[in-house]
């Protein structure tokens, strides 16, 4: 956001029927208790590009319980590091769009005008789609 504060949290998961679902959550001054419970749930693994940094920003902006975030970071899988360890990429600094193209053979738009748009206000359909796809492609 323009303030540098987390405004949107997006999550994707696979349902019990094998379908992929995404949740785009607009956050305010505090996080919902259900999201805090999710972060603390030891049965959930968090996967993404830059996931440790995302969890750190959530902790910074919302003064989350350090034990919940430490637990979540321990259960985090950094996709770029995994791709580098598997020999798919030369460096672990590759972004999600490049990983999506390389591994899934799909395009993931990281259009700067949308990525850097105002996420503080009411989200547009394009912003919601961008956030949902960003989460889904990490699965």
Image: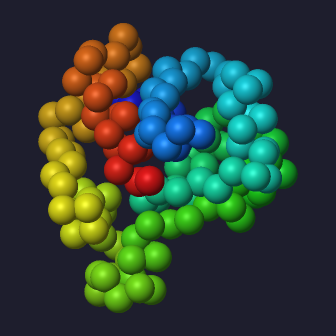
Q: How is the image coloured?
A: rainbow
- Asked whether 57 or 89 is in front, the reply is 89
Residue 122 relative to residue 9: left or right: left
Residue 20 falls in which quadrant of the image?
top left
- Count how many numbered circles sit on residues in the image: 0
In the rendered image of this protein, does residue 125 appear above or below residue 66? above
Q: Quadrant of the N terminus?
A: top left
Which residue corresponds to the image point at 78% horizontal and 35% vertical from the top-left? 37
Which residue corresponds to the image point at 46% horizontal and 76% vertical from the top-left? 82
Residue at the top extreme of this rendering: 122
- Asked whether 108 or 4 is in front, the reply is 108
Q: Is residue 116 visible from the viewing direction of this image?
A: no
Residue 43 relative to residue 19: left or right: right
Residue 59 relative to residue 18: left or right: right
Q: Is residue 85 visible from the viewing direction of this image?
A: yes
Residue 34 relative to residue 124: left or right: right
In the rendered image of this protein, does residue 75 appear above or below residue 28? below
In the rendered image of this protein, does residue 60 appear above or below residue 114? below
Which residue corresponds to the image point at 36% horizontal and 34% vertical from the top-left? 131
* Residue 69 locus on image (x, y percent): 73, 50
* Residue 113 locus on image (x, y percent): 15, 34
* Residue 13 locus on image (x, y percent): 52, 42
* Residue 121 locus on image (x, y percent): 37, 13
């Amino acid at each position: 956001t323009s303030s540098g504060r987390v405004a949107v949290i997006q999550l994707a998961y696979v349902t019990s029927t094998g379908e992929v679902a995404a949740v785009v959550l607009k956050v305010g001054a505090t996080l919902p208790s259900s999201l805090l419970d999710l972060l603390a749930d030891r049965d959930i693994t968090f996967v993404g590009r830059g996931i440790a940094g995302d969890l750190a920003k959530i902790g910074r902006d919302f003064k989350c319980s350090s034990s919940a975030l430490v637990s979540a970071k321990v259960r985090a899988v950094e996709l770029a590091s995994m791709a580098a360890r598997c020999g798919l990429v030369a460096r672990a600094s590759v972004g999600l769009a490049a990983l999506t193209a390389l591994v899934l053979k799909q395009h993931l738009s990281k259009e700067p005008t949308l990525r850097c748009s105002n996420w503080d206000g009411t989200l547009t359909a394009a912003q919601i789609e961008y956030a949902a796809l960003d989460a889904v492609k990490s699965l």
